[in-house]
Amino acid sequence: MPDMRRTGTSLRRRRRWLVTGFVVALLPSHAATADDVTIAAGRAIVADGVAPGRPGCAACHMQDGNGQPDVGIPRLAGLTASYLLDQLNYFAAGMRQNAAMGPYARMLTPAQRQQVAAYYASLPVPQTPEPPDSRATPESRQTQVSRGRTVFLDGDDRSNLLACAQCHGPTALGVGDFSPRLGGQSGPYIAEQLTHWHAGGLRDPKGAFMRAEAGHMMPADIKAVAAYLASLQVTEGKP
């Protein structure tokens, strides 16, 4: 009979090589940069909105793109323009569902969505760490963050889970236009997205791989990875 442990290790190694090759194949050959006019137009939309009585993006995501981590509103500064534009287009087309973001994205023209994405992508990453969960003891927070770091960097052989770092980078800065920056992101937001994928949701047209990987995660590990990523010191490095 074949050695099941050796067979499992071989399959995981094969998946790792496939993922690595997939990431490299999708990396852009050059980084596109937005012009100052486009960024300025996006700044105006973020501040003032595009319709009377409807606030700009800053009402939720803040003018500096820091979001509101304590209530799960994601940070946008530090994400690439292409990733942000994809998400706005998904919301506008109904391919990603959210009661707030869907109607708002549909108010924007394609050009305006591009301007908003360019503005947020141009911002420096705010140096505002997420406050720790006041309900947990320092010891339990440390244990949870430590477990999250292990899962993020190494995966989990017991559940056949690949390391998150293989797609999002060992420092969680993301990989080009393929995967978004996660370091310093809202913990509740990350946990919400992973839970959605874990439950079988697709979220958006590119969500099949994340749904497959999150399906290997235990609920406790979802919380641990979210806590670890939220705890990372925010750096200015670009993916």
Image: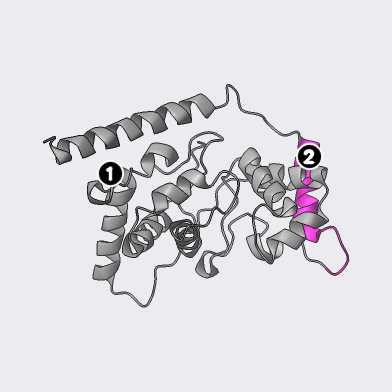
Magenta segment main secondary structure: helix
Relative image position of residue 148 (x, y in whole percent): 31, 55
Residue 74 position (above or below residue 136): above
| Residue located beneath label 2 in the image | 38
In the visual, does 136 lie left or right of 111?
A: left
The residue that appears at 68% across and 49% down in the rendered structure is: 90
The residue that appears at 56% across and 35% down in the rendered structure is: 177
Q: Is residue 180 visible?
A: yes
> Disc 2 or 1, which lies upstream in sequence?
2
Relative image position of residue 104 (x, y in whole percent): 76, 60
- What is the residue that sits farthest to the right in this orientation? 52
In the visual, does 206 lie left or right of 100?
A: left
In the visual, does 5 lie left or right of 191?
A: left
Closer-to-camera residue (138/224) = 224
The residue that appears at 35% across and 29% down in the rendered structure is: 17
- What is the residue that sits farthest to the top in this orientation? 29
The residue that appears at 69% across and 45% down in the rendered structure is: 117
Q: Distance between the residues labelled 2 and 1?
A: 40 Å
In the rendered image, which quarter contains the N terminus? top left
